[in-house]
Image (spheres, rainbow, N blue to C red):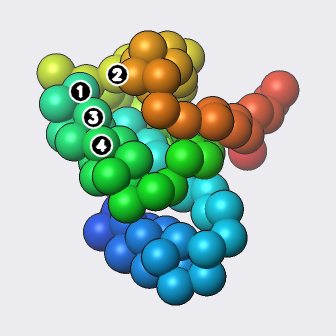
Amino acid sequence: AGGSTQSLTQEAAQTLRKTSGLPVAAHLTCTGQSKAEVRKTAERFAASGVRDIVALRGDATDGGTFEAHPDGYANSVELIAALADMGKFNIRVGAYPDGH
């Protein structure tokens, strides 16, 4: 969930949605991205018919401690709020009461 496979996720979700007609839930993280970049990704999902988003903060890219992008979301709560404000998605979350 660190964003390293983001373009593959977009391609796979969009292709599955278009070819199968089934609802597809795509992972979207805010790791290493500005708010504008995350919104652009979300808009691409919406444009391709993907309406279900699994919103995650994402893991630190280097395996260390998570640090938000200077122009990004600080956590998954901010990401979820922004996606909700767009009004285009069914938002799913993964939550852990303890570290994992």
**Above or below — where is 12 with respect to 4?**
below
- Secondary structure beneath dot 3 equals helix
Foreground of the two, 100 or 47: 47
**Above or below — where is 2 with respect to 34?**
below
Mark 4 or mark 1: which comes first in sequence? 1
Is label 3 in contact with label 1 (beta carbons under 8 Å)? yes
Is label 2 in contact with label 3 (beta carbons under 8 Å)? no
Foreground of the two, 62 or 38: 38
Is label 2 in contact with label 1 (beta carbons under 8 Å)? yes
- For the point 27% across and 34% down, the residue is 39
Please give the residue where the numbered disc 4 appears in the rendered image.
43
Question: Please, what is the three-letter code of the amino acid marked with disc 3?
Answer: Arg
Q: CA distance from mark 3 to mark 4?
A: 6 Å
Mark 4 or mark 2: which comes first in sequence? 4
- For the point 36% across and 75% down, the residue is 11
Please give the residue where the numbered disc 2 appears in the rendered image.
73
For residue 35, the mark is 1
Q: CA distance from mark 4 to mark 1?
A: 12 Å
Q: Is residue 61 left or right of residue 28?
A: left
Mark 2 or mark 1: which comes first in sequence? 1
**Above or below — where is 71 with respect to 63?**
above
Mark 2 or mark 3: which comes first in sequence? 3
Whether residue 30 appears in this view of the structure is yes
x%, y% of residue 4? 35, 64
Question: Please, what is the three-letter code of the amino acid marked with disc 4?
Answer: Glu
Please give the residue where the numbered disc 3 appears in the rendered image.
39
Mark 2 crowd level (few <14, some 14–19, many ≥20, 10 Å Cα): many
For residue 59, the mark is none
